[in-house]
Amino acid sequence: MSNNDQPCLRVFVCVTTRTRGRQCCASSGSAEIIPALRTELARRGRAAAHIDVRPCGCIHHCDEGPTLIGFTGEIAENPRPPMELSEQFLGRSDLNLTQVSLDQVRAIVDKLLGHNHDIHVRS
């Protein structure tokens, strides 16, 4: 538990690069999403202290990038993401967002904090 009694929520943002012009999260701007999320989480202070954002390997939705996935529990407690998130991990996610953009960062953080916002969520 974090210092505000919230379970840890670890958010992984795919930064995979594909070759030969293939669509991927990196070419869709995922690298810019990570610092933007971290900045917004820091702005929220203690309320967001239980949320950690990290880059990761492929989330298997390259055509829908940038993508991010969030976990609580055992997976969230591991500070290092798997090189590639397997279907086993994906099936246990608490949050799975596709086609995220910089203009959605506030809404994404609101969703991570439990507020209800209409952002594109892959089911």
Image (cartoon, rainbow, N blue to C red):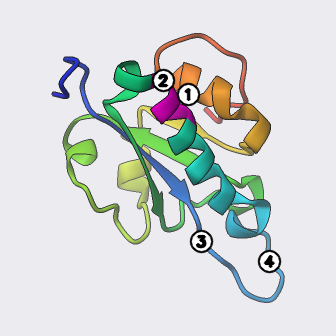
Q: Return the residue at label 1.
A: 109
Residue located at (77% from left, 69% from top): 27
Q: Position of residue 20 (x, y in %)?
A: 80, 89
Q: Amino acid at mark 3?
A: Thr
Say if residue 35 shows up in the picture: yes
The numbered mark, 1 or 2, whose residue comes first in the sequence reads 2
The magenta-colored residue range is 40-44
The numbered mark, 3 or 1, whose residue comes first in the sequence reads 3
For label 2, count other residues whose C-alpha is less than 10 Å away and answer few (under 14), some (14-19) or many (20+).
Answer: some
Residue located at (78% from left, 36% from top): 103
Residue located at (23% from left, 18% from top): 4
Direction from residue 21 to residue 96 in the image, left or right = left
Magenta: main secondary structure: helix
Q: Are circles 3 and 4 on residues that touch, CB within 8 Å?
A: no
For label 4, count other residues whose C-alpha is less than 10 Å away and answer few (under 14), some (14-19) or many (20+).
Answer: few
Q: Position of residue 61 (x, y in %)?
A: 65, 57
Question: For the residues marked 2 and 3, what is the alpha-carbon distance in whole angstroms?
Answer: 28 Å
The question of residue 42 being in magenta is answered with yes
* Residue ranking furthest to the right: 21
Say if residue 67 shows up in the picture: no
Q: Are circles 1 and 2 on residues that touch, CB within 8 Å?
A: yes
Q: Amino acid at mark 1?
A: Val
Q: Return the residue at label 2.
A: 44
